[in-house]
Amino acid sequence: MRRPTGSGVAGGDGPDAPEPDEAVDVAIVGAGFGGLGMAARLRREGTRSFVVIDGGDGIGGTWRDNTYPGAACDVPSTLYSFSFFPSTWPRRFSGQRDILAYLERLVDEHGLGPFLRMGARVERMDFDEGSARWHLRLDDRRLVSARAVVSAVGQLNRPAVPDIEGVERFAGPSWHSARWDHSVDLAGKRVAVVGTGASAVQFVPEVAKVAARTVVFQRSAPYVLPKMDRPYSRLERAVHERVRAVQLADRLRVYLTGETLGLGIVRSRRLLAALTALWRRSMHAQVADPQLRLACEPDYVMGCKRVLFSNDWYRTLARPDVDLVTDPVAEVTATGVRTVSGREEQVDAIIFGTGFATSDVLAPVEVTGLGGRSLREEWSDGASAHLGVTVSGYPNLFLLYGPNTNLGSNSIVFMLEAQIGYVLGALQALDRERLAWVDVRADVQRRFAAWVDATSRRTAWTSGCHSWYTTTDGRNTNNWPSFTFVYRWRLRRFDLLDHTVMPLRASPLATAAPPPASATWATAAGSR
Amino acid sequence: MTGTGPVASATAGEPAASGSAAAPRAPVTAGTLEAPSSGASLLPPPAPAPSLPAAVLRLSMAIVSRRCFDPRLTWPVQRSRLRAAGRLLPLPRLARTTTATLGGVPVEVVTAAGGRVPVPAGRPGGVSAGEAGLAGAVRDAAGVSSATAGWPRTLVHFHGGGYCVGGPFVARSFAVHLAALTGAAVVLPDYRLAPEHPAPAALHDALAVLRALDAVVPGPVVLSGDSAGAGLALAAAQRRRDLGEPLPAGLLLHCPWLDLTADTAPVGAPGRAGDPSLVRRDVVLRPSWLTACARAYAPDGADDPVVSPLLGSIDGLPPMVVQAAADDLLRTDAERLALMAAASGADLQLVLAPGMWHDFAMQAGLVAAAGSAVRQAADAALAWWAPRAPEAPGG
């Protein structure tokens, strides 16, 4: 393992600063797709010390948490993977296990193991102005000091279980889909599923295959489009492995498809109408019962909420042993679920596919910046960050997959790569200009937020439905409101002039030596 | 540049797309300025798109600077060459420039006019005297009051030029853009220059202008300056603090020249030439010219805060925005001021423009970075004028 250097800060820690257990250049919070991608790029650069901190006991983030049957990505794997770390995939839309294996391979091949600090969650992060360093307090009382922090805690990781009366009274087993209880065998059981979001659409068909009876409680119907999924043949896999161009071509094709779908949601009402027609044909082909068709009909414009993909969702709902209940749930009893109309379903297990707490990005972490300002207070009426990455008043803090960088129809990994490159640009600017920190200008952030608001007004997300894409007052705080190539373009380089800076305390007249080039990664990169 | 574009500004009179072709001549949007009393609701109009690649402008600056800022030339030759170069600087058409006298000091008052008042760009002094009932009214302090009536915000900007060359024309383009974004009247004092009038003549002129404005401007002014003018602004603020006079609402210091002792260091000391790579990168200034200016302005020694305000205290000064260019010999002065502020807890925001040269914001409208710097300055000034307005994060 490389020695922590702690180099390049404005000065030593103040006299009253507690002694950190570890001092690094970059602390990465979260060992999911974003955190590991950031770590891999830092490793390739090879000039900075870093650690990856994660409260879980294994890497993978979302892809470690969500082990429910049928868990898969709804973006084709050729695009839902890092461009700098290509892989061959068993099928077009890979399952959770294959994606987790990909991330484990990423860790292995980049030798990230020694940099991981697992099992302790970051409780708070405080910027110390005297030393120009972040202090990260972990829940095992350890203290990590870092020049820069990359927060890669994601948006979809804190299970949200609705506040239904009597949940604790239920005698049988119950769990949230992201904390699947694999010890319970659902074969022959009566199962209630609450929620019809992206997770439920994937696991309900699997549950229905084994359960004696499945009752699905739906608050609001989703749009579920067919998923063009299939396993790759052995020949295809061989070609993918040897001819990178084929995979690249597929990556481009998937990307353009995603952008076109996005166009429907973001701009073109005509395209939206065509997609809605496609959805209706597909749903009607699977569901014959007019009553059920009516229940499957969403009451909002397509795209306002997340559009889902599945080939067997409607087919499953049409099964005789599956019931779709649209009455709101009133309470949970010891033996089942009762709706407001008094109907009671006796079940042996309840599964909550009720999604995640999304609007409070970073919420479980207490963050204080310049002058002791608190990010929680700053964001109390909706998160906002310049380009989704930086927040004014919080120097050298970078968010991956931050506010307004979620997508309705394309790969988050594409966004992550843009953000990772931007962060690397910021770190390089710090070295090049001999700066202790950079902090995005308030007027720059405000101008960006105004652009997001104005652009979002033209999208389907703010067309009036209730979804996790918006705050309670209808402001879009989650999604990128334009094309993803626009995002990539705007993050193509880190613009130092958009930031206030603090020079290093060392004599400003001294020349800075260029950071030493490292060969640690070069050999490994050459072998691939 | 941020490329953020205009944000649903109902008052912005100019479509965003129109900038690229005619940017240098793009009219400053008039719509914003018709309601200058509407306070903080002013939304910045779209900034003119950059029309020159930075590399082209950088080369032009190198050529012009080499011919103007040359210690082997006499001061009158340098001044007339700089004046000639100033004619090349395009001005937005809707600028309104008038001259006046404040506290016995000639000043130029720049506003972004609502009407179409063509400014004879680059004419020495740039004066449109006798124009539209304004010029007659601004011959004395009371006149400025009427010229700034309806323009409740006033910003005083001291031009650069090493205390030895230049005039209001140096900063006119910057002033016009600032006036358009803030709805303020920008006063450009034509203070006396060295070596004919060494220190503290310039400071005396600066104080005289500020004292005259105290009597006629309703609220506190924002004090601004570029290069030597920024040093003058800081020195004036320090002096007014020491004398218990009204302080400005805030200080905008663009590429400030704050420590003249670095330029009058004895032979053998590294001084301003201590970083050879920075000397190479700076296309505008050379150490020998700064030394000549420093000796001319401070013949009795530069270690007095009156000429080197960095040696004075910044306690009790209003909030500051400091803009530095990365390829500028003077960036160290800005950096040292920022470190001083950090140590004393003063409110100072420093930005550093990578790849830019000394005084780049004076080419407002020509290069993207200048637009960004002007936007920051305007945003800060508006916040200082309306301190109780709700602020965004970090404000």
Image (cartoon, coloured by chain):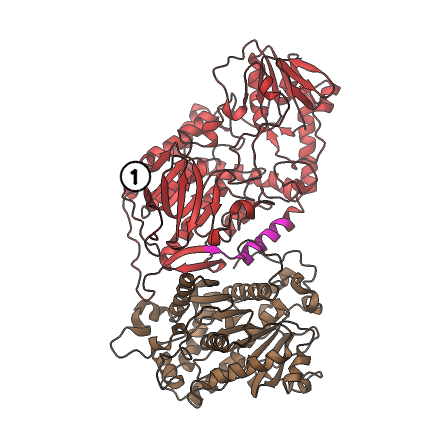
Label 1 residue SS? helix
Going 63% across and 40% down the picture, which residue do you hit?
A: A470
Q: Determine which residue is flagged by label 1.
A: A524
Residue A448 magenta-highlighted: yes
Identify the main secondary structure in magenta.
helix
Q: Residue at x 42, y 76 (%)?
A: B63
Quarter assignment of residue B330: bottom left
Q: Position of residue A521 (x, y in %)?
A: 30, 42
Q: Colour of chain A?
A: red
Percent coordinates x, y for residue B138 in the rendering: 65, 84
Which residue, as the protein is rendered here, is positioned at the far left? B268
**If the image is split into quadrants, where does the N terminus of chain A sit?**
top left
Q: Mark 1 lies on which chain?
A: A
Residue projecting furthest to the front = B244
Colour representing chain B: brown
Out of A364 and A52, give the one closest to the viewer: A364
Give B137 or A185, whichever is nearer the viewer.
B137
For residue B190, above or below residue A442? below
- What is the span of residues highlighted in magenta in the rendered image? A439-453
